[in-house]
Amino acid sequence: MQNSGRLLELNNVSKIFKIGGLIFGTELRAVDKVNLTISSENPVIVSIVGESGSGKTTLAKMILRLIEPSEGQILLNNRDITQLKKADELLEYRKTVQPIFQNPFAAFNNLRRVSSYLYDTAYSICGAKSKEEANKMISEVLEAVGLSFEKVIGRYPKQFSGGELQRVSVARALMPRPKFLIADEPVSMVDASIRMNIMNLFKTLRDKYSVSCLYITHDLSTAYYVSDFIAIMFRGNIIEYGPSDLVLTKPLHPYTELLMSSVPRVDKKWEKDIKLSGIEVKEYESAGCKFALRCPYAQDICKKSRPRVVKTKDGREVMCFKYEGKKYEEE
Ligand SMILES: Nc1ncnc2c1ncn2[C@@H]1O[C@H](COP(=O)(O)OP(=O)(O)OP(=O)(O)O)[C@@H](O)[C@H]1O
Ligand code: SF4
Ligand SMILES: [Mg+2]
């Protein structure tokens, strides 16, 4: 693929946090040399799935420029986002990438009308010159998310349900006509009954408005339902990546297998079933495969060396020694 066909490209991106005291403290590699490419040719939904503490939010925050990577490069339309300094470059970035946060009620001040946020975005980011122009922009995006101008204008956050307010957040994010939404657990705080409505909205935005989405979640079932590609994160690494149906119906990585076997019921936070916090630190610090302490297929080499990312013949990427060699690897 030509470089020009890349909307987002992460090259060996890491985030190292210092934890504990200055003297006795240690370093935590919350995101560890992550590579990920999202094409600009066709809009796609890519899910990042992983248990609590696997580095999903840290990765999203780096792409949103909320924190800086410790290592590596994040390119958006071939530009390194950490190097953007000029006002027009930053505005362009803000127009291209928009966040959707977990808690819609936290995104709006209870004492401000919800519409005031939409007008702010219309004037400051989208360059609306008059109230009429702003109204037109707002009506269009509200319609895109299935809400009406009349229903939203003049009302306060408490007068909306969580699902409606999350739709308003999405409408606001859509105003600058972004190419890319980053949605970190966008439905975990809305009623289970309307989660699928919001997930369908992301599909509509992809198909009708050509907006790609990075959907971050604990929830394998919504990830399976909504996404074209899935990246499974474990201890800061993407350990398996590929088309979502392949990854979730025929998992390659032993950790993906474990996840699949621990999704017993809708709405159950499966991270609680599999989290073994006692060995968490050991896993992060391991010189070998971070999953070796729990892996039923672990060999001696797994404890000593870190597996590389193997590109498989069926179009996946997997970080596991089991798949190194001619049988699985792409020629
Ligand atoms: N500012 C920080 N300082 C130190 N450590 C941090 C900081 N932010 C995150 N971490 C650590 O980095 C690791 C990854 O955290 P992160 O929030 O990215 O995980 P997550 O996958 O989003 O988890 P969750 O599913 O619970 O939201 C965790 O061990 C967390 O404690
Ligand atoms: S590299 Fe070894 S320990 Fe790690 S997941 Fe693969 S088989 Fe298991
Ligand atoms: Mg998180």
Image (tube, rainbow, N blue to C red):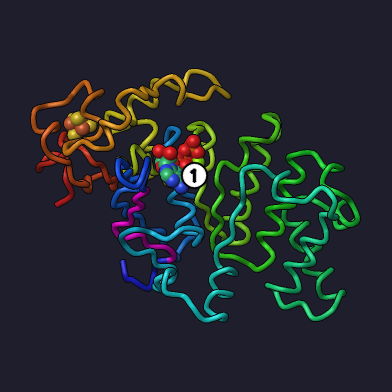
8 in the magenta segment: yes
In this picture, residue 211 sits left or right of residue 258: right
Q: Amino acid at mark 1?
A: Ser
State the residue at coordinates (39%, 67%). Answer: 75
Q: Residue at x 66, y 61 (%)?
A: 174
Q: Nearer the viewer, residue 113 or 131?
A: 113
Residue furthest front in the image: 23
* Residue 32 belongs to magenta span: no
Height in image: 70 above or below 315? Answer: below
Q: Residues within 10 Å of mark 1 (few under 14, many from 20)?
A: many
Helix, strand or loop at label 1? It is loop
| Residue 208 pos. (x, y %) | 63, 58
Most foreground residue, 15 or 183: 15
Give the total number of marks visible in the rendering. Answer: 1
Q: Can you tell which quarter of the image residue 161 is in?
A: top right
Quadrant holding ligand 2?
Answer: top left
Q: Which residues are magenta?
A: 7-17
Q: Is residue 187 visible?
A: yes
* Residue bearing mark 1: 227
What predominant SS class does the magenta segment belong to?
strand
